[in-house]
Image (cartoon, grey):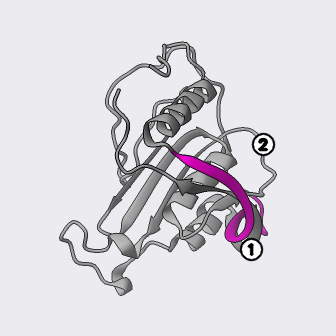
Amino acid sequence: MLGTATSGSAVNQLKIMLQNLVRERFGLTLHHESKEAPVYFLVVGKNGPKLTKAAEALDQVAPGPVARDKDGYFDLPPGAPDFVGLGTNGSVRVSARMQTMVNLADKLGLTLDRPVLDKTGLAGSYDFKLGYADQRLRGSRGGASTEASDPEPDLSDALQRQLGLKLESGNELLDFLVVDSANKIPTEN
């Protein structure tokens, strides 16, 4: 056995254990390579940020179901970090509690065609809601909607209007993990 995770294992230790497991079981060899790639930079808009500083974390957070408000956003309980998004029929509703700009940039990078890097210079954590239209989700639940009746802005406009942030295109030197070789069939336990 390569390692056993316990409840006290640090995240970095777990990552190293997983890397060692995959390396041994699949005969994986890889290397890091840096190269310039297209990115988006998350920056503060010309009129400044429109974010609410998050309150301090609570020692106890009441568990229970998370309800949605009249606009379709999740109403997250105070005192615990959370980031919840729901996309249906072309609309995306994101509710965030106690999130950093780095976390927001990372989440945006998952939905866009390239990574997003935080260049806002905003420290600390924030609570916010973000709603926007996403054409990739249009009709995914069987509903029909036209652009003319679509009251929501696209992601870029929503970031600017609702959060006072914007995305700028650019290039950045990024670290890539390159697989040199791997076995198709893992070794036995």
> Which disc, if any, is residue 170?
1
Check disc 1: other Cα within 10 Å, few if <14, some if 14-19, many if 20+. few
Question: Which image quadrant: the N terminus?
Answer: top left
> Left or right: where does residue 5 sit relative to residue 122?
left
Quarter of the image where one finds residue 176: bottom right
Question: Which image quadrant: the C terminus?
Answer: top left
Quarter of the image where one finds residue 63: top left
Amino acid at circle 2: Ala
Amino acid at circle 1: Gly
Per the image, the residue denoted by label 2 is: 123
Q: What is the span of residues highlighted in magenta in the rendered image? A: 28-48
Give the mark nearer the N terminus: 2 vs 1. 2
- Please give the name of the residue rendered at 56% of the width and 67% of the height, measured from the top-left corner: 158
Q: Is residue 124 above or below residue 108?
A: above
Q: Nearer the viewer, mark 2 or mark 1?
A: 1
> Left or right: where does residue 73 sit relative to residue 130?
left
Indicate the position of residue 72 as horizontal and vertical percent values. 36, 53
